[in-house]
Image (cartoon, rainbow, N blue to C red):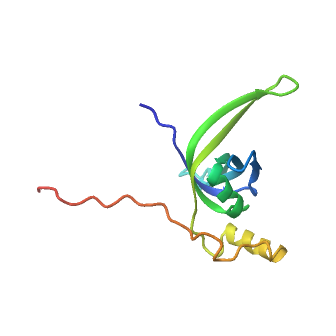
Amino acid sequence: MSLNKVILIGYAGKDPDVRYFDSTNVVAKFSLATSERGFKLANGTEVPERTEWHNIVVYRDRAQFVEKYVKKGSLLYVEGKIRYSNYDDKDGIKHYITEIYADRIEFMPTSSGSREGAAQSANASATPAASPTKSDVPTPTEIPQAPEPADDLPF
């Protein structure tokens, strides 16, 4: 048995690039940034913050959802599979690509001072007609928590 599953929580690095092949075949691609906080070791050594960039690929209905609602700075929960590919460019140099094929994408709750809030307010001031109203944007959903185990131990 094997399992190929990736779970990421991070910020969209750009607006999605969406391509339609016909009315039902749609693909959306965007980058997602995840960060690990910096910290100080016991001996005083500073370990800086580390940001990783992930290439997210979404198909069909999910791609249409991403096109409509995901914008640069959106805080997202992404669940999917990791895929690797490679190609040779015109100079014969081999390039390797790592992508996350998303099966599930959800908005994460954000505080008013977050990056997403700042990005949405910046977009709203730049193009007020293009910004979705509150009724257009799906409500943020939280990641489901595992149920508490029943305490039915015999001792």
Q: Residue at x 65, y 33 (%)?
A: 84
Q: Name the quarter where the N terminus is drawn.
A: top left
Q: Residue at x 64, y 71 (%)?
A: 137
Residue 64 in view in this figure:
yes
Residue 86, image x, y percentages: 72, 29
Residue 128, image x, y percentages: 80, 77
Q: Name the quarter where the C terminus is drawn.
A: bottom left
Q: Which residue is the extreme one toward the front? A: 23
| Depth check, front residue: 115 or 105 | 105
Residue 48 in view in this figure:
no
Q: Residue at x 62, y 43 (%)?
A: 100
Taking 33 as reference, is 97 above or below it?
above
Residue 31, image x, y percentages: 71, 50
Taking 84 as reference, is 148 above or below it?
below
> Which of the 4 image quadrants contains residue 95?
top right
> Which of the 4 image quadrants contains residue 149?
bottom left
Q: Which residue is the extreme one toward the top? A: 92
Numbered label tally? 0
Q: Which residue is the extreme one toward the right? A: 91
Q: Is residue 91 left or right of residue 12?
A: right
Residue 132, image x, y percentages: 71, 73
Q: Is residue 146 left or right of residue 26?
A: left
